[in-house]
Image: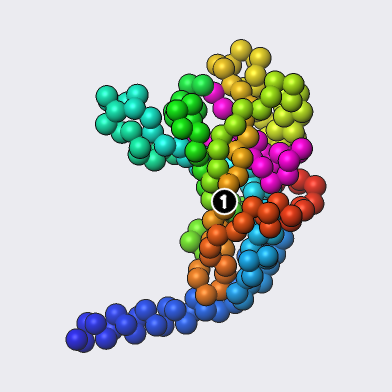
Amino acid sequence: MHTLALAVLFTLSHSAVLALPSISSCGGERVTAVGETHDQAARLARNLVKNTGIGTFMSVMNADRNDGILEGYPFGSMDYYADDCESPGTPLMLLSDLQVNVRNAKTDNRVSLAIRRLPGRNENTSPMAEPRVTLLGHLVPVAKDKYANAEACFLAQHPNVGWLPGSGFHDFKWYHLEIKDIYYIGGFGGIHYIGWIDTETYHSKEQPQFRAQ
């Protein structure tokens, strides 16, 4: 009983700390949050997607590996993306047919992209207290006549990329992640919004011109 009482006291004391207002930065914008609304969370999610440019891209494993023993398992790896210039809020991705995620998507194009705020230089904060968002949807090829626009948009946000279509570097192609739903975690519960954000509200939150980080 004594141990249980100490555990309860420890939890309550830490809950009290977590209930305090917090100040966070998302895409250069500092936000004081004491219970974000759905609308505010949608705006912060759009800001995060626009200004981060890298995330964990996930797909559903197909039956190719080890006679199908991994079929249906989730698979994820880090990838660049850009906030699409023609369809703001939609991730634009440059992917190779050699990638496991792309091979999986040819069987089942349901995918997701998890994005978190990246810490600034000399910033010492817990990732668990920072905003993150998961975009769920379908991986769809970009039409070939849109490749020039996709390249210009992507290079504006990732100027170091050299593995472009036609460069002779494997077989990279352009894709969109067409979003079906969004799950946002602003930080610790009770302070920040945690939950689903509908795509209509998300896409309605216009963001300022992209700023390189």
Q: Per the image, is 81 magenta?
A: yes
Q: Position of residue 183 (x, y in %)?
A: 54, 56
Tag 1 residue? 181
Q: Position of residue 116 (x, y in %)?
A: 56, 52
Q: Nearer the viewer, residue 199 or 167?
A: 199
Q: Residues within 10 Å of mark 1 (few under 14, many from 20)?
A: some
Question: 146 above or below 176?
Answer: above
Quadrant location of residue 80?
top right
Is 74 on the left-hand or right-hand side of 88? left
Task: Tell me the amino acid under the disc marked 1.
Answer: Asp
Identify the element where label 1 is drawn. strand
Residue sitting farthest toward the left: 1
Is 157 on the left-hand or right-hand side of 13? right
Which scheme is used to colour this image of the protein? rainbow
Q: Which residues are magenta?
A: 77-96
Residue positioned 39% across, 40% down in the render:
74
Q: Position of residue 195 (x, y in %)?
A: 53, 63
Q: Nearer the viewer, residue 44 or 23?
A: 44
Q: Is residue 119 visible?
A: no
Q: Is residue 58 visible?
A: yes
Residue positioned 73% across, 41% down in the render:
87
Q: Quadrant of the N terminus?
A: bottom left
Residue positioned 60% across, 44% down in the render:
179
The prevailing secondary structure element of the residues shown in magenta is strand
Q: Position of residue 104 (x, y in %)?
A: 44, 29
Question: 155 above or below 211?
Answer: above
Q: Per the image, is 201 magenta?
A: no
Residue positioned 24% across, 82% down in the render:
4
